[in-house]
Image: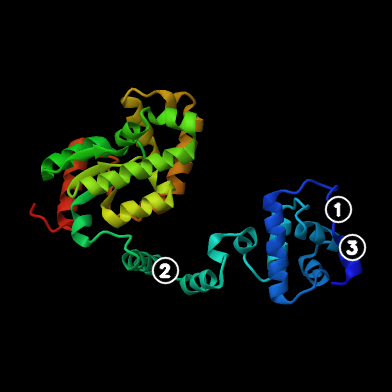
Amino acid sequence: MTSQESTLMEPSESETKRSPFLEALGERVRTLRSRQGMTRRAVALAADVSERHLANLEYGTGNVSVLVLLQVAQALQCSLAELLGDVTTSSPEWLLIRELLSKRSEADLRRARVQLGEMFGEGGNAQERKNRIALIGLRGAGKTALGQRLADDMGFPFIELSREIEQFAGCQISEIHNLYGANAYRRYERRALEEAIQIYPEVVIATPGGLVSDSANFNLLLSHCTTVWLQADAADHMGRVAAQGDMRPMAASREAMEDLKRILEGRSAFYSKADLAINTSGRSEDQAFDALRTSVRQHLALPA
């Protein structure tokens, strides 16, 4: 790029107030362009955008659309994630690891995750995992009722992680979200889970439905507990919550049902990482407990 081109293309400070995010994005575009050995003009032509538009992007003054970012990423032969600054694209080692793991099966990725956890001392040993049983799933799946019965059957303590979170925070879950926000809630969730793992070598834990949404907390759970996904269809989830006396989901039943279906769809891939899965739909509590008890005892090689 010539000095004349730089003068023509670089926006003045008075043109717009720069956003730190956009400045960092522009820096990544320049770095990736340099890595490819491409001029700004060449990238603009390959991305089918004006050179001026690309210059604004590089100097952190262009609030571009996602489609334009995708075109620029393709021109630079990188992923959109790399352009946006995904941590797994932040160094050559990360990029090499991503390439090594790409196109691997879910089973291969799971084995890699478990081995990495063991390598870095993040996972518990097999015996520790065996005697901590964590029930996951959405509200209304039966985690509390079935969890208490399973704990009694096995002679283990039973804890509801939501109650432990409230003990740490000194207020109800809803108040944590309203007063302190989602990030604070996740921190309390982490502290409660860490304490449960530290205190109880044998325990049945009923976890909050959204725990799987935080990868760090979910990794901790998977590493230290035998996990069981209590499944149910959306109608059963909603009906059971209403039966508990909470009529909020029924206030706008059609919209609530659609939201619930989307949540189930979005979390199912994470819930499916559990060691076991028990479908409680179409079963009485006794039937669901019998299925849970049998499955857990078989998995842990315990007498029936």
Crowdedness near tag 1: few (<14), some (14–19) or many (≥20) residues, C-alpha within 10 Å: few
**Residue positioned 32% across, 51% down in the render:** 221
User: Where is mark 3, residue-wise?
Assistant: 7
**Residue positioned 84% across, 72% down in the render:** 1
Report whether 251 appears left or right of 61: left
* SS at mark 2 in the image: loop
Could you tell me how far apart the alpha carbons at marks 3 and 2 are, in whole angstroms?
A: 50 Å
Task: Judge by depth and name the residue closer to the eye, 92 or 277.
Answer: 92
Total marks shown come to: 3
In the rendered image, which quarter is residue 108 located in? Answer: bottom left
Task: Work out whether 101 lies above or below 123.
Answer: below
Question: Which circle's residue, 3 or 2, is located before the other in the chain?
Answer: 3
**Residue positioned 35% across, 43% down in the render:** 191
Could you tell me how far apart the alpha carbons at marks 1 and 2 are, in whole angstroms?
A: 49 Å
Instruction: Identify the disc placed on residue 12.
Output: 1
Report whether 255 appears left or right of 43: left
Asked whether the viewer can see residue 103, the reply is no
User: Where is mark 2, residue-wise?
Assistant: 105
Crowdedness near tag 2: few (<14), some (14–19) or many (≥20) residues, C-alpha within 10 Å: few
* SS at mark 1 in the image: loop
